Amino acid sequence: EMGVDRLHHGFWKYFDPRHPKYVPGNKYENVVLDYYRYIDREIGDILGMVDDDTVVFVVSDHGARPMEGGICFNEWLVREGYLVLKEEPDRMVPLEKVEIDWEHTIAWGEGGYYGRLFLNVKGREPQGVVAPDDYEKVREELREKLEALTDPEGRNIGTRVFKPEEVYREVRNIPPDLIVYFGNLAWRSVGSLGIGDIYTFENDTGPDDANHAQEGLYIIYDPRNRQDGVRQKMRLLDVAEKVLELMK
């Protein structure tokens, strides 16, 4: 069911008084709550169709939260001297449309719900400049600076920065060198250049006023083993563990 996800991104500012774009009494104020009621009825219909030998899971792969704005990742890297351009764009353009001076570039970033930072490593990238011996030093330097980021009023936004190997036991494909949760996901990562500021309150890929969150939903309905209450610190992988347990 993708409706809930799409609704969060498109309508969060209409129902949440904490959102910076919220306007009291707007005509969409009850849209999200009404949709959740609809989903609840649909789940009720499903439960009415299954027998007592059927266990039903309601699971999300992520949560949702209000989004305060965007951090223009590559604009910040340019201003900090890590990303060097041959020519500054005069309008908003994606990174791939900009001519980069790779011989003097240390890092670049990708946008999205969270930021991905890549280092221009000598021997790994075609025009790498970061010596392998300096790799960890540069990563730590960038992590420290990113975690010190403030909002336009000078308040630290609580950015969290991870090394992929700290999060994943096995890293596949081409991992970034750092994973960045701007404002712990209260701010999204904007990869475009030419915005003229490191802060933006309009998304570069279309209207979006919510971001993903770490805390998702995990509900089990087992007619033969009814358990009420809430369990904390569950993980998405616990779903697989429970399914395997039921299949024994």
Image (tube, rainbow, N blue to C red):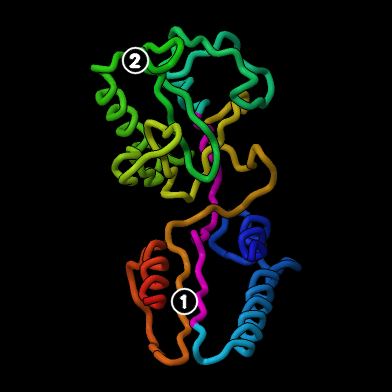
> CA–CA distance between discs 2 and 1?
47 Å
User: Closer to us: mark 2 or mark 1?
Assistant: 1
Amino acid at dot 2: Val
Q: Secondary structure at mark 2?
A: loop
Which range of residues does the magenta coloring cover?
55-73
In the rendered image, the vertical position of residue 60 relative to residue 80, given as above or below:
below
Q: Main secondary structure of the magenta part?
A: strand
Per the image, the residue denoted by label 1 is: 219
Decide which of tag 2 and tag 1 comes sooner along the chain: 2
Q: In front here: 119 or 188? A: 119
Amino acid at dot 1: Ile
Q: Secondary structure at mark 1?
A: strand
In the rendered image, the vertical position of residue 114 relative to residue 27, given as above or below:
above
For the point 68% across and 78% down, which residue is it? 38
Is 62 contained in the magenta span? Answer: yes
At which x and y percent is residue 178? Answer: 38, 34
44 horizontally vs 151: left or right = right
Most distant residue in the front direction: 248
**Image quadrant of residue 132?**
top left
Q: In front here: 155 or 87? A: 87
For the point 54% across and 57% down, which residue is it? 66
Could you tell me which quadrant the N terminus lies in? bottom right
* Residue 64 numbered tag: none
